[in-house]
Image: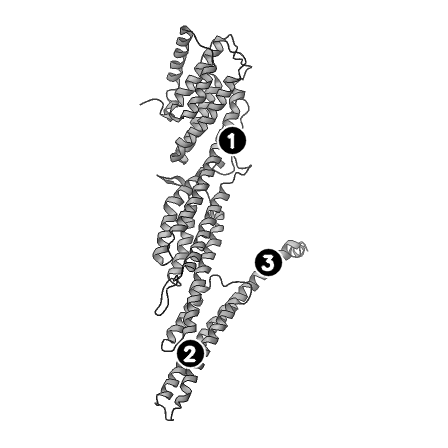
Amino acid sequence: MANLEKFSSPDAKSKSSKRDKNLEKQNSITERVDCIEDLCDIISLLLPELWSLGQSYFSGDLYMKPDQNKLAEFKSNTLACISEMCRLVRTSVGQGKSPLVGWFPHCLQCLRSVAAQLSQIPHDPLTALIHHFRMECVKSVLVNAAEQVKELSIKENWNQIHEPNYGLITHLPGFFKKCVDTAITTLKGSALQKEAKEAELFDSEPLQKEAGQLVLVIFNNYIQVIDQLSANGEEEQSFTVSQMGASTYRKNQTPLSWEEKLLSCVCNVKYSCEVVLPDLCKTASAAGLPPLEWVMKEAAGSLGGLRSRLEFMYIEAKSDPLVGTIEPSMYIGHFDWDTDLPPRGVRPYANEIIANLIAVHAQLERCCNWMKDTALTQIMETVTEEVSRLILCAARMSNQGAMQAKLDIAALQFALARYTSPHAQRFFGEALEAIPPLTEANEKIVEELLDNYKTRMHLQLYAFSAISK
């Protein structure tokens, strides 16, 4: 009884109805293709024999005397027969709501087979129909490829491949290239293959533009797939910035964190723009599609825009939590810049900034090395702006507090010198100007503490190449 209820449930009925509609749609397409095949078979079988018989009759090879007055009518009727077949084929294609997606290459082959059989017979209507089918075949195959590309996000498994010049890409660009290559190969063996007496397929600018637009749709769908895959799901984001107090790190369900997936998307964009798209355009042009330079330029522009946006997303995702930890860390333990305690070393907030940037550096080094300098430089600008703001906001600063502030800033300047832009250096300068001047003795103490720090952090700072080997 439970099983019967399961099959009679609304969900089961909905699935059954959907399955029936799909079956009905497939049957409709198959019937129309069968009709086209039958029409081609009938004309191929009967018309050449009828034409041959007519030629024998009008040339006097038969036992009866030919009526030459009927020659024009015979030719007209033969051409009318071919025209009617073409009309019926066009009707079969246009019938129903379901287009013959995937069947145009096969139908084109059937029509070409008829044309080969009618080589001795004038068949201009069939030649025009074949030209029409060739263009429809191009549209059908490219539209089908565009739909397949839309589904590529399902295939993304985040298995990474190291490309020396591009970082850790995934299999997605390969899936995309294979999908488009398959479509081009199909067209090369059908619509783009020019048979005898067939006209050039892209003999007009509108047709060239139309084909280019279809290829551009394929590329744009691929760009949308990468964009969708880069989306930051709240449940997927992993927080790797350490904070004083309770840890905010939580393990991800998948082997890769969201930031690592985002970096793979950035690498995929760069690899696709510089390798995959040029290869595909070259293959497409060699196969017979019209020149695609303008398509390549437009797609490259879209990929460049996506890459900039994804890089900004990553930098923002790393900067915001990092900057948010600076103030709490600076004042941990109720620290006050107006302190009477002499500095004993670099304070935790400065060490934490450096440790967090080392972690970002390590992630970029592993996943996307070419983006490292740009990303760390921009993150540094945000960090130095926040440090400068906090130093400038200090109400009062004792001599000991001034020594501590100068030591912290000097440590940051030394450790992160490679990624300190003029903009970041200006923020450091503003902070240093706000610190009360130190005596020579105090300056010497700060220098000694800084030298101590450099010695202790020697190994960690190799990550930034701050210390020469």
Q: Residue tagged by mark 2?
A: 45
Q: CA distance from mark 3 to mark 1?
A: 43 Å
Q: Earlier in the sequence, mark 2 or mark 1?
A: 2
**Which residue is painted at 64% across and 54% down in the image?**
11
Front residue of 103/386: it is: 386
Q: Residues within 10 Å of mark 3 (few under 14, many from 20)?
A: few
| Residue 421, percent from left and from top | 40, 26
On residue 326, which mark appears? none
Colour mode of the rendering = one colour
**Which residue is painted at 64% across and 57% down in the image?**
13
Q: Earlier in the sequence, mark 2 or mark 3?
A: 3
Q: Is residue 420 visible?
A: no
Where the C terminus falls, by quadrant?
top left
Q: Do residues under tags 2 and 3 come within 8 Å of each other at their CB atoms?
A: no
| Residue 240, percent from left and from top | 49, 30
Q: Earlier in the sequence, mark 3 or mark 1?
A: 3
**Which residue is painted at 46% across and 49% down in the image?**
220
Q: Is residue 23 visible?
A: yes
Q: Residue tagged by mark 1?
A: 239
Residue 80 drawn above or below residue 275: below
Front residue of 282/160: it is: 282
Residue 422 image-quadrant placement: top left
| Residue 194, percent from left and from top | 36, 65
SS of the residue under disc 2: helix
Q: Residue tagged by mark 3?
A: 18
Amino acid on which the number 1 mark rests in the picture: Phe
Amino acid on which the number 3 mark rests in the picture: Lys
Q: Residue furthest bottom?
A: 64
Q: Residues within 10 Å of mark 2 (few under 14, many from 20)?
A: few
Q: Residues within 10 Å of mark 1 (few under 14, many from 20)?
A: some
SS of the residue under disc 3: helix
In this picture, residue 96 sits left or right of residue 414: right
